[in-house]
Image (cartoon, rainbow, N blue to C red):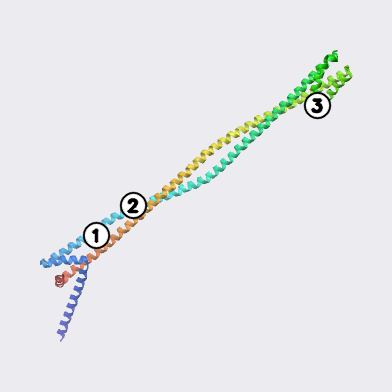
Amino acid sequence: MQKLAILTLVVVLAASKFVDTHASLAQIDSDPFGNVVLSAIKAHIQAQTPANEVNMLLNGVAAGLQQDQNDHDHAFELDTTTNNRIVEDLEKEILYHQNQIASNTQLRDDTIEALAVSEEDIRVTIQDIATNESTYAREEATRNQQHETFVAKVAAIDDVIDAIDEAAKLIQHLSLGASFVQVKSKYETIHKRLTDNTSHSQLLQPVVAALTELATHGVNQKALTKIAQLLSEIRQQLVSEKAAKTDVEERQAAHWAEFSVHLSNEHTRLVERKAQLEVQIQEQKDTIEDAQSWIEFHTLELENSEERLAGQQAWYAVQSQIYETQTAERAAQNEIVDRLQEHISEKLSTTAQFISKRN
């Protein structure tokens, strides 16, 4: 009874192993790679080749898988090295373009601020030039008017002095014995000049009255002496007045000469300043335009570099996925080869029976 139980146990265990082997082989056969390998093994079995040749076949398949993996590892290593270099270069490009955009943006903004200052400076300078020219024109007109007034007043004084001198000569002739009848015509001319004078009528009034009285009451030495004295005093006053006006004229002329030079020098300085500002403003506008052009250029280059970096990273992600997928596939294929080698070495008859029954 005990022997029967042991025999039954052995049969059950053998059947169990047979079922496990068939299930494992069926699983391998369902895999495309396993199906191909099993077909190759079946061909060897049908050709009744020695078992060691089947093992050699599996060893060759395993070696081929290992070689493929080695080649793939090497290719992926090269891809990784190339990718890292390209990514590093692209990141440097991106940083360069970012720095250029930042520096040109700063340059543009700073220059815009400087341009605003320059434009305000030239506005003020143009206004100062206009003020300078207006001042020059006004002061020149004033000076010309002063000179014209001086010339007119001096001419009037000279005219009165000339009339006074003529009157003095007339009085001298009368004092030397000339009759009034002899100088009457001259008297009337001189009397009219003095009477008609409007610039110094108040100053001349005493001598005009004396000359009128002379013609009315007749010539006498006392009257002549009085008139001569009046004429001398008036002439001295006129000479003093002319000297005073000449002094004022000279001082005004000197002041204008100095002030006009100052205005001219200031005008020259302002015009030169305006020209400098015009050049400066144009340079600033050119700088702003150039900076903006560089900003646009580097922005496009930055976008291009970022797109290339994204493309490179996407490419490397695909290569990494392919590498991982194919590595996993080879690992699974190696596992199939290992399981087949195990089945053949440990359960050759069961394996051969399964393979022989395959379609």
Residue depicted at 25% across the width and 64% down the height? 329
For mark 3, what is the residue? 201
Of badges 2 and 1, the one in the foreground is 2
Sooner in the amino-acid sequence: mark 1 or mark 3: 1
For mark 2, what is the residue? 86
Of badges 2 and 3, the one in the foreground is 3
Q: Picture coordinates of residue 287 (x, y %)?
A: 47, 43
Q: Quadrant of residue 151?
A: top right
How packed mark 1 is, by other alpha carbons closer than 10 Å (few <14, some 14-19, many 20 or more), is some
Given the image, on which type of amino acid does mark 2 rest?
Ile
Could you tell me if the residues under marks 2 and 3 are in contact, i.e. CB atoms within 8 Å? no
Q: Picture coordinates of residue 295 (x, y %)?
A: 44, 48
Of badges 1 and 3, the one in the foreground is 3
Given the image, on which type of amino acid does mark 1 rest?
Gln
Along the line of sight, which residue is nearer the eye, 166 or 139? 166
Q: Is residue 96 above or below residue 172?
A: below
Task: Using the image, tell me which numbered label, if any, was put on residue 69.
Answer: 1
